[in-house]
Amino acid sequence: MTETRKSPPELGGADVSKGVFMNAPLMPKATAVWLVDNTALSFDQVADFCGLHALEVQAIADEEVAIGMQGLDPIANGQLTREEISRCEANTAERLKLSMSDIPIPEARGKGPRYTPLSKRQDKPDAIAWLLRHYPELSDAQVGRIIGTTKPTINSIRDRSHWNTPNLRPRSPVEIGLCSMEELENNLDTARARAQRKAVRERKAAEKAARQNGDVLAAAEVSSEKVVPEASNEDGASSDTTVWSAMADSKAAGLSDEAEAVKPEWPPKVEESDAS
């Protein structure tokens, strides 16, 4: 069996089953007044159904709370049936179950564009100029939400093409009354977090590019080291061998004869002088 728990009193005592909020009784306190006056339900049963505290229901019964309040009949408006009340009156452990309506619940409408009084609309360009000067990290979409303006207006003030640019006086939107300080701080926190994430992404991309460039340079150095020996040792012969082999093809015999001709004798002969 699915356990049904009660939501906090500020939500009107709505039953929550599997995380889905059920319909709460209309005007809980007035409904509690009617149930206390017209039924034999216990205080806990009434409190559980109306989303109130048992002591508050007891104070209603003692006429200490909701004095003079007109009770609301939940049977007349289709929120309860007489059989359901009789079933819970027979057993205090039972709990009232709200009757489900066949009328479809209307969809919640989204927020429209921010409304700005006519007296403050002329101050929007001043607030936009202030935000662009002091908080450039805010995106155009954020500035548009804070001030309630459009991107073309923001761009015209940024590039000073706005028709009233000479008369602009940058002023805080909080001071003017176009937004609250809490709203401005929330947008600033979002913009700064976005800037930090962008900086981290750029740093990681730079590190990755640096690693790739480092690998390319290392490969280029290795390839250059391999090319130099191959150029020097082409055809399996060294440069020294090539030079001396060319010299061997020349008149090696004549060179050797000349070397023998100029070779000095040792020990040198001493010529006798005429004086001796």
Image (cartoon, helix red, strand yellow):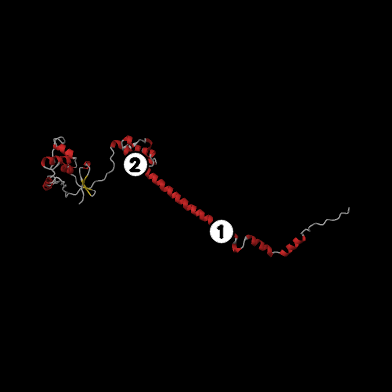
Q: Residue 103: x percent and y percent? A: 17, 49
State which quadrant residue 118 falls in: top left
Q: Nearer the viewer, mark 2 or mark 1?
A: 1
- Which residue is pictured at 43% across the width and 47% down the height? 203
- Which residue is pictured at 43% across the width and 49% down the height? 204
User: In this orientation, which residue lies closer to the viewer: 146 or 116?
Assistant: 146
Q: Is residue 32 visible?
A: yes
- Of callouts 2 and 1, which one flags the residue occurring earlier in the amino acid sequence? 2
- Which residue is pictured at 34% across the width and 39% down the height? 185
Three-letter amino acid code at the position of disc 2: Asn
Question: Which residue is tagged 2?
Answer: 187
Three-letter amino acid code at the position of disc 1: Val
Q: Residues within 10 Å of mark 2 (few under 14, many from 20)?
A: some
Q: Residue 106: x percent and y percent? A: 21, 47
Question: Which residue is tagged 1?
Answer: 227
**Element at badge 2?**
helix
In the image, taking residue 265 as reference, residue 119 lies left or right, namely left
User: In this orientation, which residue lies closer to the viewer: 52 or 152?
Assistant: 52
In the image, taking residue 218 as reference, residue 65 lies left or right, namely left
Q: How many marks?
A: 2
- Which residue is pictured at 35% across the width and 41% down the height? 189
The relative height of residue 19 versus residue 53 in the rendered view (above or below) is below
The relative height of residue 255 versus residue 137 in the rendered view (above or below) is below
